[in-house]
Amino acid sequence: MQSKTNTSSKPRAWWAAFLNREALTAYAFVLPAMFGFAVFYLLPTLRGMQISTTDWNLLSDPSNIGLENYQSMINDPVFWNALKVSGLYVLWNIPLQTVIGLFLAVAMDRLTRSMLVRAALIVPYLISNVIAAMVWIWLLDPFLGIVNSLLGGFGIDRVAFFGTPELALPSVAGINIWRHMGLTALLFYAGLQGIPRTVYEAAMIDGSDEWTTFWRITLPLLRPVTVFVLVTSVVGSFQIFDTIAVTTDGGPIDATRSLVFYIYDNAFKFFKMGYATAMSITLFAILIFFSILQLRLFRADQSDLA
């Protein structure tokens, strides 16, 4: 009789854990975020998957064509070139942006903690991409730009930074490195403040020099911040559009035609919404893959402080 009573009480305890006052309060706080996620992310993604299987020019009703858009994408050399350009942009942007940001963060932590310095670092990030691109177009202009004037003063020939296929993509990457390195530095700086000073004191007592302390203590303990910086930076870099649209318009000779720029062209210039959505879904899958890969490689679920 006692065993039956215990068995019948288990479902009540299970439901009680999900319907008590604290749980209901938690649901009330989470519900707005879940609603926003469903309306602005989940439903559009599902709708995009459906559109990617249609032939739709935005003016007439879409017609279902199955996986033909994906087959066309596989056989499209411009798509593969755009994917290559996006990958090269990530390789130009992420390593330099991360290294420079980490260097600035360590320099601030060791040399100065002035609020004025931190404010100066974040100023480029507060400027919109369009305005930053327009400023750098003027600075790098081959005839009127200050940079080329300085190069001419050193006897170096003027350079068409945005007009040369070999230099156009690095120049675009340089603009975004300049704009985002301050934010990256502040993220690393915040991570440095979370490292206990007793760890550095113990390393100093053990006779560890600055370089060894950085590689053996600082860098491993910054792993959670590093993972966050890399994941968000890679996702953002693959979606580069506005800087390219302002500076090069995808040229010269498709040297800066990134995947998002090619998606935009197909959607709003060629009115191939189904094909553009198929490429968007493919980009979505690529970003998920690289995000999971980075989280696994850097063991984002573990902490060295523990």
Image (cartoon, rainbow, N blue to C red):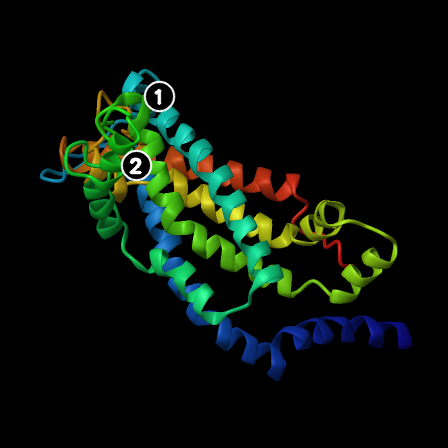
Give the x, y percent position of residue 222: 65, 53
In the rendered image, which residue does mark 2 sit on?
Answer: 260
Q: Total label count?
A: 2
Q: Report the front residue among 298 and 206.
A: 206
Is 164 situated above or below 99? Answer: above
Residues packed near mark 1 inside 10 Å, few (<14), some (14 to 19) or many (20 plus): some
Q: Report the front residue among 5 and 142.
A: 142
Residue name at image x 26 percent, y 33 percent: 153
Q: Mark 1: which amino acid?
A: Trp
Quarter of the rendering containing residue 112: bottom right
| Direction from residue 217 to residue 43 in the image, left or right | left
| Direction from residue 282 to residue 100 in the image, left or right | right
Give the x, y percent position of residue 137: 21, 41
Q: Look at the image and tell me whether residue 1 can be seen.
A: no
Q: Quadrant of the C terminus?
A: bottom right
Q: Quadrant of the N terminus?
A: bottom right
Give the x, y percent position of residue 256: 28, 29
In the rendered image, which residue does mark 1 sit on?
Answer: 80
Q: Mark 2: which amino acid?
A: Val
Quarter of the rendering containing residue 63: top left
- N-terminal of the pair, mark 2 or mark 1, is 1
Q: Report the front residue among 2 and 171.
A: 171
Residue name at image x 54 percent, y 43 percent: 99
